[in-house]
Amino acid sequence: MYIIPRGWYNEPVNVKGADYVIRGYRKQDYQSYASLIIETEGLEPSGRCTSPQALAAEMDRPGHPPEKYTLVAGYQGGLAGLASVVHEPVAGRSIVQFLVHPAHRKPRLRASLLDSIIQLAEDTGMGAVQANARQADMAARRMLAQRKFRVVRRFLEMRLEMDNALLAGYADDYQLRSLDAGEEDKLAELQNRCFAGTWGYNPNTAEEIAYFMKVRCCRPEDVLLVYQSGSLVAYCWTGIDPNDNRRGYICMLGVEPGRRERGTGRAALESGLQYLRGRGASIVDLSVDSENAPACKLYNSAGFHVRDSTLWYQKQSG
């Protein structure tokens, strides 16, 4: 089996006559990087935003220069795959992701790229390395299991057909408005309060909120703020699939800890659904931790149903 020497990522990999080199990302790789993502998304749609703005923004994640945290599998015709690692020190983890173009999806290449990015993640000294895989992606799941990863969480991928939405209407004492440009700090503070102590959550900064806006092809007005008696109590961050404007999604929905179980979450959810309906969405997707019982109950009560699952895997670093 091909092993990447520790700290060195410029080694050749031969897969049935095709030569690949796993190495660090370089600025001149950008066009091939974008083409790889766009072509893969076209063959296997996931809802990923592939606009020029979003792809360029991915290169500017705060604290994660791609030259340091992204690896590519290069070949004579361009890039066959890429992998990246994100460090979340507060959560005590590094998250690895990898992508190989379907035309190059050979087990040996995928394994070499995965081993390389895991090693890069371990070299940074975080307590745990995590990765996720769709429940139906048996190849990825086998690869992770072979590398001593174990399942630690299951997220439900839920969908609502808007024609089947069960909207009861929320109380009149809630006031709504959209987030204004320049209020990223307000959203970061609210989000960090709402999700403090939640599994896998790493506190965000205003800079990171602005980053996520760009990579998700969102606008400030897609974030709906919910007020009650003049106090900000919840929010619903929505978006529209850039490849299919009939598909909306809810990125995050948060409620102030002291305002839960009072109908506030329902008000935030319904405001988001009504907003997406107004933008032409006929279906809405979201992801929720299967162990978050109140959130699962809320989404079920609105008519969402489970269509898939994502498994989070973890191994201790080192």
Image (cartoon, rainbow, N blue to C red):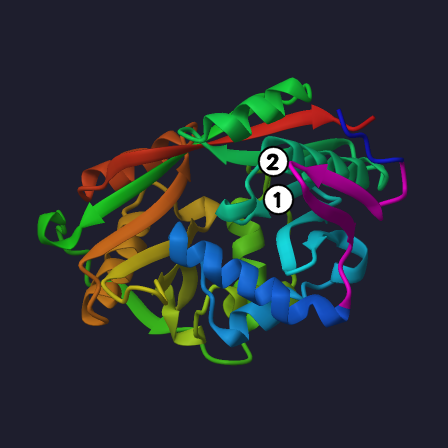
Q: Is residue 185 visible?
A: no
Given the current orientation, which residue lies at the most extreme left position?
163
Is 9 included in the stretch rendered in magenta? yes
Q: Amino acid at mark 2?
A: Ala
| Residue at (25, 67) in percent of width and height | 275
Gap between marks 1 and 2 measured at Cα: 6 Å
Q: Residue at x 55, y 80 (%)?
A: 182
Please provide the residue range marked out in magenta: 6-26
Give the vertical position of 182 relative to 202 (above or below). below
Relative to 176, does residue 134 appear above or below in the rendering? Answer: above
Q: Can you say which quadrant of the picture contains the N terminus? A: top right
The mark that comes first in sequence, 1 or 2, is 1
Tag 2, which secondary structure? strand
Q: Are marks 1 and 2 in contact (CB under 8 Å)?
A: yes
Taking the image as shown, residue 35 lies to the left or right of residue 26, namely left
Whether residue 57 appears in magenta in the rendering, the answer is no
| Image location of residue 148, percent across then percent down | 68, 19
In the rendered image, which residue does mark 2 sit on? 131
